[in-house]
C-alpha cells in the first residue's frame, strides 16, 4: 500500500505526511491552492508587510511538537510573554475580564459581584448549554455584558444555542476572592491558558512547516471535485484523476461530503447542519509601531465591526518594514447565522474607522498598506446541532475508509499543534491496517 493520497497541505496534512514518512511512505499531497500551508500560510506583500491567515502563535506544551517546530526553523524563533486585553464601552480591562473589573463603572462592578455571590449560594444549576454554564460560573450581569455578547460576535449564535464541548481551558472560572481582588486592585495577576508563545523569527508562521515540505510529493492547483470510494478514485477540477490505496483528508466536512459519489441523503442532511464561521481578515500597515501594548485584544461592543485584533509586528520585527506597525482585524460571518453580503474589500474603510473610534489608530496615522482576505472556513460553531450531525458524518466516512483530520476534518476547536497530531493519528489508522 504505497499509493496514499493526502488532501490538503496545512498542519494536519503535513502531520499525516510526517507519520507516513517515518514508515518509509511518501504520500502524494494535493492542494487546491498554488502554495502550501492551508490556514497556516503566510504572505509577504510588496509593501514589506507580512500577514498570516489569522493570528497564529505556537503555545503548545507538548515538548515533542515544540522541538519539531524549532528544528523546522533552525531554532530561529521568538519567545514572547503574551499580553492580552479587552475593549468594552471605552474601557480597556486586562484579560480575562472576570479577574480585572477594576476601572469599570462602579455600578457594573457592584452588580457583577452581587450576582456572582448570589449564583454561588443558589442551588446547583442544571447545565444544558453554554448559557447555563456561564450563569452558573459568573452570574447574570457579567455573563450578559461580556461572554454572551462575545458569543454573538465570535460564534455568531446565542449562548443558549451552544454546547460546552469546546470550552476546555478557554474560559477561567474564578473564586470570589479572585473577583474581589481584581475589582479592588489594578494590579491583579493575569491568569490565562497562554502565558508565552513562540513565533518564527523570519517568514511568518508557515515557516514552521519548512522541515515537513519534502516529506510529501506536493501537487498544487488541484481542487478536489469528486471522490468515488467504491473504486478509490479522486478527481480534480483541472481534469486530473487518480486512484488511491488509502486517503487522508483535511477538507472541510460540508465540502467533502458533497463531493463523495453515492453519499446517502441523511449524511448530506447532517453535513448541512455543521456550522462554521467565515472570517474577513482586514490587514492594515501603519507608519508607527507603538500601536498597542497587547498582542491580542478582544472587542465585546456589537457596534464595533471586528471581534478581535492582533498585531503581527509584535510577533516578529521582520513582519513589517523598519519602524512600522501592523494590525489584523477579524470580522465574522456565518452562512447559517449571519451571511456575508458584499465584498470583503468593502469592510476595509469601516474597520479603519472603527480602529480610529476606539483609539487604536490616531487621526494623523499614515496607512501604508491595507487589504482584506476572505477565509471561508474559520472557527467551528459548537451549536446544538453539531454533535448528532458530526456523529452521522464521521460514521459514514469511517465506513467508506476516508480518514479525516484537522480542524475542519475533525470539526473541532483544534489549535495548530493539535491539528498536526490529528494528521498523525489519521495516518496511524492507515498504518494500523497495514
Image: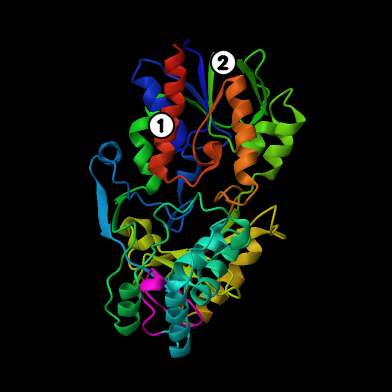
Instruction: Report the residue marked by disc 1.
Output: 15
What coloring was used for the rendering?
Answer: rainbow
Mark sitting on residue 153 = none
Of residues 175 and 159, the one drawn nearer to the viewer in this rendering:
175
Q: Is residue 108 above or below residue 392?
A: below
Identify the image quadrant of residue 240: top right
Task: Name the outermost residue toward the bottom.
Answer: 106
Residue neighbourhood size for the residue with mark 2, other residues' Cα within 10 Å, grouped as few (<14), some (14–19), many (≥20): some
Residue 212: within the magenta? no
Please, what is the dominant secondary structure of the magenta stretch? loop
Residue drawn at x 51%, y 41% is: 407
Image x and y of residue 264, in percent: 74, 27
Residue drawn at x 48%, y 63% is: 124
Image x and y of residue 253, in percent: 61, 37
Residue 98: within the magenta? yes
Image x and y of residue 156, in percent: 62, 60
Instruction: Report the residue marked by disc 2.
Output: 244
Identify the image quadrant of residue 257: top right
Is residue 372 in sight in this rendering? no
CA–CA distance in space, label 1 to label 2:
19 Å
Which element type, helix, strand or loop, lies under badge 2?
loop
Residue neighbourhood size for the residue with mark 1, other residues' Cα within 10 Å, grouped as few (<14), some (14–19), many (≥20): many
Which element type, helix, strand or loop, lies under badge 1?
helix
Q: Is residue 6 above or below residue 134?
A: above
Q: Is residue 153 left or right of residue 97?
A: right
Q: Is residue 74 left or right of residue 128?
A: left
Image x and y of residue 55, in percent: 44, 55
Quadrant in which the C terminus is drawn = top left
Kindly check if marks 1 and 2 are in contact, taking CB atoms under 8 A apart as contact.
Answer: no
Read off the magenta span: 87-103
Q: Is residue 229 above or below residue 54?
A: above
Q: Earlier in the sequence, mark 1 or mark 2?
A: 1
Amino acid at each position: 500500500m504505497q499509493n496514499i493520497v493526502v488532501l490538503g497541505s496545512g498542519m494536519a496534512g503535513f502531520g499525516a505526511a510526517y507519520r507516513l514518512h517515518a514508515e518509509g511512505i511518501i504520500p502524494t499531497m494535493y492542494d487546491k491552492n498554488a502554495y502550501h500551508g492551508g490556514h497556516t500560510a503566510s504572505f509577504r506583500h510588496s509593501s514589506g508587510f507580512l500577514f498570516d491567515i489569522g493570528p497564529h502563535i505556537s503555545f503548545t506544551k507538548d515538548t515533542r511538537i515544540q522541538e519539531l517546530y524549532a528544528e523546522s526553523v533552525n531554532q530561529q524563533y521568538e519567545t514572547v510573554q503574551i499580553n492580552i486585553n479587552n475593549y468594552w464601552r471605552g474601557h480597556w480591562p486586562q484579560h480575562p475580564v472576570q479577574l480585572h473589573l477594576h476601572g469599570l463603572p462602579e455600578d457594573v462592578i457592584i452588580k457583577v459581584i452581587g450576582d456572582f455571590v448570589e449564583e454561588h449560594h443558589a442551588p446547583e444549576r442544571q447545565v444544558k448549554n453554554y448559557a447555563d454554564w456561564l450563569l452558573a460560573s459568573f452570574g447574570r450581569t457579567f455573563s450578559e455584558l461580556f461572554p454572551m455578547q462575545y458569543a454573538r460576535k465570535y460564534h455568531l449564535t446565542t449562548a443558549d444555542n451552544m454546547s460546552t464541548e469546546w470550552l476546555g481551558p478557554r474560559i477561567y472560572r474564578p473564586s470570589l476572592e479572585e473577583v474581589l481582588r481584581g475589582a479592588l486592585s489594578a494590579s491583579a495577576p493575569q491568569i490565562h491558558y497562554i502565558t508565552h508563545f513562540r513565533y518564527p523569527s523570519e517568514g511568518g508562521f508557515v515557516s514552521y512547516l519548512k522541515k515537513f515540505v519534502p516529506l510529501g510529493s506536493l501537487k498544487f492547483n488541484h481542487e478536489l471535485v469528486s471522490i468515488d470510494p467504491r473504486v478509490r478514485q479522486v478527481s480534480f477540477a483541472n481534469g486530473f484523476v487518480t486512484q488511491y490505496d488509502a486517503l487522508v483528508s483535511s477538507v472541510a466536512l460540508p465540502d467533502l461530503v458533497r463531493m463523495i459519489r453515492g453519499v446517502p441523503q441523511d449524511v448530506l442532511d447532517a453535513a448541512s447542519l455543521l456550522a462554521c464561521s467565515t472570517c474577513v481578515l482586514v490587514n492594515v500597515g501603519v507608519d508607527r509601531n507603538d500601536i498597542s501594548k497587547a498582542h491580542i485584544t478582544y472587542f465585546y461592543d456589537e457596534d464595533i465591526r471586528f471581534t478581535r485584533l492582533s498585531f503581527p509586528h509584535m510577533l516578529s520585527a521582520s513582519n513589517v518594514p523598519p519602524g512600522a506597525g501592523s494590525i489584523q482585524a477579524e470580522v465574522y460571518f456565518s452562512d447559517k447565522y449571519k451571511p456575508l453580503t458584499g465584498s470583503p474589500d468593502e469592510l476595509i474603510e469601516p474597520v479603519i474607522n472603527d480602529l480610529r473610534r476606539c483609539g487604536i489608530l490616531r487621526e494623523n496615522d499614515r496607512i501604508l498598506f491595507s487589504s482584506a482576505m476572505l477565509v471561508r472556513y474559520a472557527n467551528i460553531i459548537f451549536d446544538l446541532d453539531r454533535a448528532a450531525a458530526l456523529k452521522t458524518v464521521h460514521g459514514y466516512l469511517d465506513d467508506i475508509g476516508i480518514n479525516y483530520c484537522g480542524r475542519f476534518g475533525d470539526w473541532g476547536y483544534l489549535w495548530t499543534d493539535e491539528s498536526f497530531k490529528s494528521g498523525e493519528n489519521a495516518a496511524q489508522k492507515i498504518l494500523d491496517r497495514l
